[in-house]
Image (tube, coloured by chain):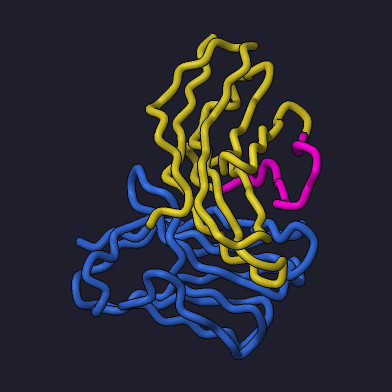
Chain colours: A blue, B yellow
Amino acid sequence: DGGITQSPKYLFRKEGQNVTLSCEQNLNHDAMYWYRQDPGQGLRLIYYSQIVNDFQKGDIAEGYSVSREKKESFPLTVTSAQKNPTAFYLCASSINRATGELFFGEGSRLTVL
Amino acid sequence: AQKITQTQPGMFVQEKEAVTLDCTYDTSDPSYGLFWYKQPSSGEMIFLIYQGSYDQQNATEGRYSLNFQKARKSANLVISASQLGDSAMYFCAMREGSRGNNRLAFGKGNQVVVIP
């Protein structure tokens, strides 16, 4: 089945450590996105990429980094510079035409101890 | 400034009843798209319905319909004949500009609990 796979589903890390969240899609979508969700809040855009080897900052990029070396993959690194990294992270993809709706993965929940 | 506003408190809905979720938006771009997503307790976001700013008719998808009032900048979601599986958070989102740019701005969501 086509879809978006995020891993790990749950992740714990100590303060000061970097951690990388994986996002893979087999939908052949051009664009990919990372969103952050805090309890009781909507989604906020961290980074997005419309084509391979290109990405742009979203609204809350500080303390995060991404790469887009392959069309299928868009990993997100949460660095030690991110002051409040505990959150639910959602990866999405879309085709750059039609209605442009985003297709989401199941999310990764990061907890910093 | 907030682009999408969802201010309703959590709602309890009787099974088989209809429910309306409010969403207002703010944009000066004449071309935009409006989306509704459902987020069950498991966390994934499920696309429900889309309305383009130039669409003449309100969008419908099965039990979901979008009450689009452009002059009021309102895009309310109506769920007819509620089912227990409709219990979830519902998010309104907007894309500004052409369809080549699919960045979405999300509201804070509406919590719906369907009771038997």
Quarter where residue A85 is shown: bottom left
B5 relative to B48 in the view: left or right: left
Residue drawn at point x = 38 percent, y = 57 percent: B1
Towards the viewer: B87 or A22: B87
Q: Position of residue B30 (x, y in %)?
A: 66, 60
Towards the viewer: B112 or A80: B112
Magenta range is: B45-60
Quarter where residue B77 is shown: top right
Q: Is residue A77 magenta?
A: no
Image vertical order of residue A51 relative to residue B77, above or below: below
Q: Position of residue B88 (x, y in %)?
A: 51, 32
Towards the viewer: A87 or B59: B59
Q: Is residue B53 magenta?
A: yes
Residue drawn at point x = 34 percent, y = 52 percent: A38
B69 relative to A97 in the view: left or right: left
Q: Position of residue B110 (x, y in %)?
A: 46, 34
Towards the viewer: A52 or A14: A52
Residue drawn at point x = 46 percent, y = 17 percent: B12
User: Is residue A5 visible in this depiction of the protein?
Assistant: no
Image vertical order of residue B61 relative to residue B79, above or below: below
User: Is residue A9 visible in this depiction of the protein?
Assistant: yes
Q: Position of residue A39 (x, y in %)?
A: 33, 46
Please identify the quadrant where the C terminus of chain B is shown.
top right
Image vertical order of residue A40 relative to residue B81, above or below: below
